[in-house]
Amino acid sequence: MTEPPRRPAPPPATEAHEVRFEELPLHPSLRAGAREMGYLAATPIQSRAIPEAVLGRDLVATAQTGTGKTAAFLLPILERTLDLPPGKIYALILTPTRELALQAEEFLRRLGRYTHRKGVAVYGGVGLEPQIQAVRGGVEIVVATPGRLLDLMERGHLDWSALKILVLDEADRMLDMGFLPDVRRVLRELPRERQTMLFSATMPPEVVDLAREFLRQPKMVHVDPTVVAAVGVSHLGLPVPGHLKAELLRELLLDETMTSVLVFARTKHRANRLAQQLGRWSVPVAVIHGNRSQSQRVKALEGFRGGSHRVLVATDIAARGIDVEGVSHVVNFDVPHEPEVYIHRVGRTARAQRRGDAFSLVAPEEEADFARIEKLLGVAIPRARIPGFGYDRTAPPSVGRGPPPGGRGPRHGGRPPRHGPGRRDGRSGGRFRGPRRRP
């Protein structure tokens, strides 16, 4: 491949200047791949991180989920390895979950479609032999979870002698999941002369210590999470008694504009129970959480991406591996205790500068948590009540079993709900129209 002269790295982007991908110091083949993925204007993390990373600098980047950080480290990796001989491992990306590993591998394939770079995802929960064969077949980029990577290293299947770039993705999540000792073991086996990039949503002391130990005079890049959460996302709080949350969610789903809905529940048990209840109401639904097998997770995500599942119910532990274009709505079935978790959740919609809606079902006992979210965002999130919904119904003896709480559903002869939230109607001062009914 003949490469035209590279442009010098542009100065760091400012908030007032929107940087387009054509302005970034990337080979035309990479810009073409990015363009086919829908990248036109760079997000803040991309415009700030890519020029520094292309120069080979160590990097510490703080950016929330949904800000485009996967491309922010994959494009520099592809740029810096574009003309190196094939068949040697030049880059390693460490990530905490298999979903994130698969996501990065998919992004790598799409961004690098006009290059000759090959990558492999290495993760647990599946057979080891196919991953060994893929590595032996010759790859230049490895995306891996720490535990499975150590398995392959201990068996002598990985040669790091040509390694030039290391990325630690979601470093704080790896810390939360107890991977820090494994990460340190991996890093000690890698060549000392390398570029290291660390991406993290937050920067706890342990991650700071990791950066000090393994990075050399890193460039610091920070994207304000409050700005990220506000761009492209419309937030709405829906106060409701806890025992009526499932019914209110069903009411919301009468709105035909809610085409691809990601619902967050606090625990695996609540996620399973909600998915079962939605299924009884004939809602196409899948569920994903830490107890699901790898094949179950892949099937659920593929069904959600393909549209056969309109709703995907998830817990936070699985949320960072969910990258689906066109998520129309995020619904917080349970308000998270930590405000930062809210940022991660709503980042699954309005991705890559698209728009999306975030609804939160707020029980009275969750108002304090919701107030902390508003404080982090720096805005008061509007509240709404759905016309015609029976908020005063008492809890049945066993919530979540048998018929829907508060009466029989429309399939059983009961009165169907009358109104849903619809889309925000700016012409009526923030009030909501009723939804369009499905035929």
Image (cartoon, rainbow, N blue to C red):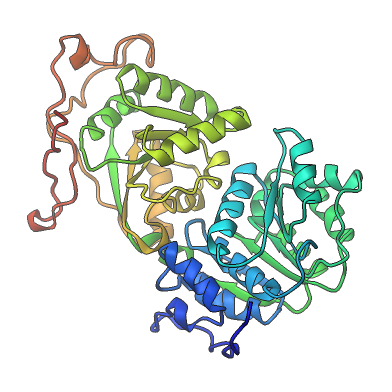
Q: Quadrant of residue 90?
A: bottom right
Question: Residue 296 appears at what percent x and percent y?
Answer: 56, 28
Res. 147 in view: no
Q: Among all residues in the image, which is located at the extreme left? A: 428
Q: Quadrant of residue 332?
A: top left
Question: Residue 145 appears at what percent x and percent y?
Answer: 72, 47
Quarter of the N terminus within the rendering: bottom right
Question: Residue 120 appears at what percent x and percent y?
Answer: 69, 51
Residue at image x 74%, y 57%? 139
Residue at image x 78%, y 43%? 133
Q: Nearer the viewer, residue 316 or 260?
A: 260
In the depicted structure, whether residue 84 falls above or below residue 148: below
Residue at image x 80%, y 43%? 132
Q: Is residue 312 left or right of residue 232?
A: right
Quarter of the C terminus within the rendering: top left
In the depicted structure, whether residue 27 falls above or below residue 374: below
Res. 415 in view: yes
Question: Residue 225 appears at what percent x and percent y?
Answer: 48, 63
